[in-house]
Image (cartoon, coloured by chain):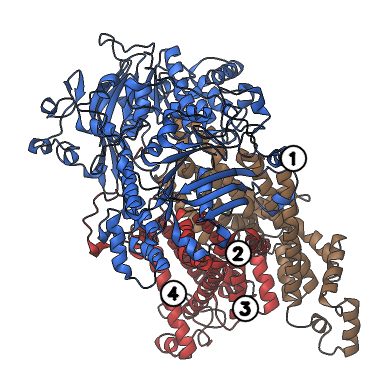
Chain colours: A brown, B blue, C red
Amino acid sequence: MDYRYIAIRLLQTIPVLFGVSVIVFIIIHSAPGDPIVNMLGIDATDQNIAELREIHGLNEPLYIQYVNWMGGILQGDLGQSLTRERSVTALITARLPATLFLALASMLIAIVIAIPAGIVSAVHKGSASDYAVTIGSLSGISIPNFWLGLILILLLARTYSFLPPGNYVPPSQDPVAALKHVILPAVTVGTAFAALLARQTRSSMLDNLNQEYIKMAKSKGLSSRKIFVRHALKQALLPVITVAGLQFGYLLSATVVVEQVFAWPGMGRLIWSAVQQQDYPTVQGTVLVVATLFVLINLIVDLTYSYLDPRVSVS
Amino acid sequence: MVDAPQEETSHIARTEATDALLTVQDLTTEFATATGSIRAIEDVSFDVHPGESLGIVGESGSGKSVTARSIMRLLDENGRIANGSVELNGRDLSTMSEHELTEVRGSDIAMIFQDPMSSLTPVLTAGTQITETILEHQDVTKAQAKEQAIDLLDRVRIPDPESVIDTYPHQLSGGQRQRVLIAIAISCDPDVLIADEPTTALDVTIEAQILDLLEDLVNEREMSLVQITHDLGVVAETCDRVAVMYAGRIVEQGPVSEVFVEPRHPYTAGLLRSTPRIADVEPDLLAGNVPDPGERPVGCNFAPRCTHSTEDCHAVNPPLEPAGGHEVACIRTDDIGPLEPIPAATRRESTHQEVGGTIVEGENVRKEFSSADSLLDRLLPGGDPPVRAVDGVDLSLSKGETLGLVGESGSGKTTLGRLLLELTDRTSGEIRFDGRPLAEVPNGELRSRIQFVFQDPNSSLNPRQTVGKILRFAVNKHEAGVDVDERIAELLTEVGLDPETRYDYPHQLSGGQKQRVGVARALAVDPDVIVADEPTSALDVSVQGQLLDLLEDIKRKHGLSMVFISHDLSVIRHISDRVAVMYLGRIVEVNETADLFDAPQHPYTEALLSAVPNPDPQMNVARTVLEGEIPDPKRPPTGCNFVTRCPDAMPECERLDPELAATDDGDVACLLHHDVTRSDSDEAERSTN
Amino acid sequence: MSEESGYNGSGGQSADTSDHSRASVENPTGFQRTWREFRAHPLAVAGLAVVSIVTIVGIVTFLDDALLENALIKSVYYSPFKPEFMPLQGPSMAHPFGTDTLGRDVLARTIYGAKVSIQVALTAVLVAAAIGSPLGVIAGYMGGYVETIVMRTVDVILGFPALVLAIGLVAALGFNLTNVIIALGIVYVPQFARIARSTALSVSNEEYVDAAKALGYSRPHIVFREVLPNCISPLLVQASLLMAFAIIAEASLSFLGLGVQPPTPTWGQMVSDGSGYLTSAPWISLFPGAAIFGTVLGFNLIGDGLRDALDPRESAERRF
């Protein structure tokens, strides 16, 4: 293990996280409209407004507000929701599992379908299956996920009643029902992800199969299967891992939209309703959490890649 | 250094009575392309007998690599054997199924590829890549295979084989990787070993090691070796028989001792005559260019360039037929008779110009490159030390002379060349131009008085600019008032190109033409000094000679001074007045060309000279093969830089670091010749790093 | 020195310097050659056709809306805004795409939606390219502190999942067309900067860049005349692919009600309007969604085709 490299990467992540928090803060505080006024309504007196502003600390200069906010975060306090009677942290804790469950299910479906498809299409380049995979993955990345979701609901839930149209059931409560309920949303989110992965796998495999060391392996008299598995596959999957990890951000974005379609009580829906209600502390907290999660996942993917690719980790 | 004829190698060429091991008959290979089918090689026939070494030699476009790959059936997807047969031990490889081939490859016939870095799978250890071959063809356990692998690594002279087993390819040096490839190839004791340019990507001293190794292995195992190369010297030194290929066909074939001494085909003779040699002869160049595979002429492929060709030569492709003891593909060979392989003329003394005062001078020049990737990498402790590319160099260039700068990888020669015109900023030390420190020379003046000719024709010209535009940029920088179009035409003509070339884009030109454009660009500002960085290394032999002649002509005509950087000693001999030999960032010897080549002082220079393969089979010297690798420039040895590999090292060489000092026979940095060591401040600086 | 061990018909190099036909001068990555390669892929051409149609519709509608107050569409067909028909009518000869909940013609609204989508996608991506590419090239060529600062900033923006950042930005700026363009532009700048930088990095290692330096050309000249022109190919491909993403992003924002607001018809919004009537009137969601799908597919096909045409070595060779 190259500890020095790990240390450098960790240290490089800190300014990014800092930057992320600053941007979240700035964005939210540039929003039009005074949230307090919106909250209290038109009849609010100036005094009410002033009091409430004081309570929420909105009179301090911006950088003080930032420091207070950051201080709170580092202690686990993300603020109070303006429109709901709960702390932002509580809201997030309640919603995050649903989103994570959906994201993981999507990823699983995508990986299981995409990687074999990509490999097959590369190995049988130019054949009918290659063509099918290529067309399929092009469609997959082009189709709007909310539209796909609606179509799936229309066909499988309404017309034919195969599967329930969303509605989250926690796996801890009832695993079977949880699976049934997550399939449609997961397929919706997972389709584009699968398409991307299939394309990446295919091109990575093809690059690999053209390399000189594959010819070398052939010259040793190794069977095609051995060459494929040992020499080509491992090498080809490395960039796919990176892409998969990086596209996790796409998954997080996608859940925002898809949760709407399937009435899935996750982070995406929370962000949306908070934006609609101008509940800025909540918007702030959720965006920050999602972004932080994303940055950390990127870091983990990076380190995993360096662990797996011998060329990277050695000092 | 005593010249001694090479000893007869122990595996004398077999008589014709023994059956051939590998018989290639009328082999023809085609590639399907967007523009139609291209025949890469045609009617190639040769035999390889047990225990003998056959060299297949040719320039690019000759089809030698395609031949090797056709034999092993390792062609790209769009290639196929259109005709002919390849018989190994009585079985025809050209018609076997893939499944059958997996049994033959690796165990009966094996191949070593050209570029060791791209031929080894990056994600598998060296050991795995060896053991899997063994396990594929032999019925042994994993542990036994590992034992064998360690043994093999030892045989290919890799130090510390037990730990190399677990290393990854990128952790090894070029020479080590090539040894691993060899270990893999011989692991199952094949009858035939095909080596495709095995040493082209390696430094000269490492090349010598590998060639030596191959020779030993071939003797020891009674293997047959087919060596593909463009280097005539390698063939002369290591092969019994040779097949010369030109434009996809074999033009001459036979024992090396005959073909290289009394060649009969005009191309073979032309090739031998135009190859730069270490001996003091002036190469005699071949006119014209090799035809592209799709554009081969009707009749003899070489006829358009042949000084002996007649009408009949353009009619039909001559077959290989016996003549004068070996085989030649030339209908006129009986009339022409044997040809002279070595040009008669010695280096023209008239090329010497008047050498004037010092024009460029360097004093204790240093350049260090940091090995850090990022800011943090630099700040955190524990990173790699910097690379000392140039480590305290003194040099001087006189007006009108050509100084050759020669060295292997890591020697710092390219970096030094770049420092002279501030393409790279130096870390410390002084460089003076016309007596003035570079800092005092205005940028505009510097840029118009000293120019650079680059190495890689595929990288030195902006692909999105026409030749005319490239030159226009150069001309505009020099004089504003001159008629640009006229000047461009003038420049192009001067470098031997048609003025119409100005409308071409770089990708439409050949390598040689691109290099000429590079020279034209350097000339555009009317400089006094030109630094040429390996300008011929990427070119074919026959084209190399043309470019070198061009440089000499231009130098003479404009009264230029030149620093010529190269790793190729034959080229350096041809063009330089004085030579400076570099090793690991330092100059180890400087002398007049003739003196340096005839009586080298520094052990490294000796080894370098003897390592260069000589195309004359009658003149081979016993090689001094250096042991070990070129040290890591980040961690040079204490004491003399060369101590780890020096055959004449003394005990004090490990403690004291010699300075470049003048002796009766030129400047040397070696304690064998004087006592001057590098100043104490150097030592102190080194010991604290 | 390496010899080709195979041939792929990439064309030999002319060994003869004396014969040049001026009429067929070619720039290696110039329009003609790229177009020729692009043309060879039927699907890529199909994509170009679809995108062209949508773009033309978009431009005409844009002009109609900006200069003629929609007189053209109203006279030739129906108004996208006025609820003048029977609501929830299925597709028919009079209304090929049917009518929506308020009695507006769906086809007319889909046509208008093209304007919004194309306007957003083209503007956002072009602006992002114009800002991000030079930044990236400069960062790549100059290295050092400049590179560190630019790339760290890029990293921060890339630290957000794209749509989440876009939502945050429009929430802060306000839900209208201009702000959607700004938001997406900000989200896409890092994409261009990243690719520009890595291309610039490898181009900077080419010898011709050094040659320019040896001639004494200034940094700005080298960056903009030598380096940048050689970085364009991957940026073009990226632009095309990002336009595809931009269309989906705009549609997603409108679907969520966080983009261009009603009564302006946008495809995403139309899909959302129809989501409550999936079984009874599926055409309301179906057609706008199909429009998104088709247009995005078109851009993706163009992007792939461009990538193949500009650097055939890079892409896995496709059959089409």
Q: Is residue A265 above or below residue A116?
A: below
User: What residue type is disc 1 on?
Assistant: Thr
- Discs 1 and 4 lie in a common subunit: no
The percent coordinates of residue B510 (x first, y second) are 31, 49
**Marks 2, 4: nearer the viewer:** 2
- Discs 1 and 3 lie in a common subunit: no
User: What residue type is disc 3 on?
Assistant: Asn
Question: Earlier along the polypeptide chain: callout 2 or callout 3?
Answer: 3
Q: Residue at x 41, y 55 (%)?
A: C308
- The numbered mark 4 sits on a residue in which chain? C
Residue under label 2, please give it: C190
The percent coordinates of residue B139 (x first, y second) are 52, 14
Question: Earlier along the polypeptide chain: callout 3 or callout 4?
Answer: 4
Residue under label 1, please give it: B688
C-alpha gap between disc 3 and disc 4: 21 Å
Q: Secondary structure at mark 4?
A: helix
Within 10 angstroms of label 4, few (less than 14), some, or many (20 or more) residues? some
C-alpha gap between disc 2 and disc 4: 26 Å
**Marks 3, 4: nearer the viewer:** 3
Q: Is residue C213 visible?
A: yes
**Marks 2, 3: nearer the viewer:** 2
Residue at the extreme top of the image, as rendered: B17
Residue under label 3, please give it: C179
Residue under label 4, please give it: C55
Question: Earlier along the polypeptide chain: callout 2 or callout 4?
Answer: 4
Location of the N terminus of chain A by quadrant is top right
Mark seen at residue C2: none
User: What residue type is disc 2 on?
Assistant: Pro
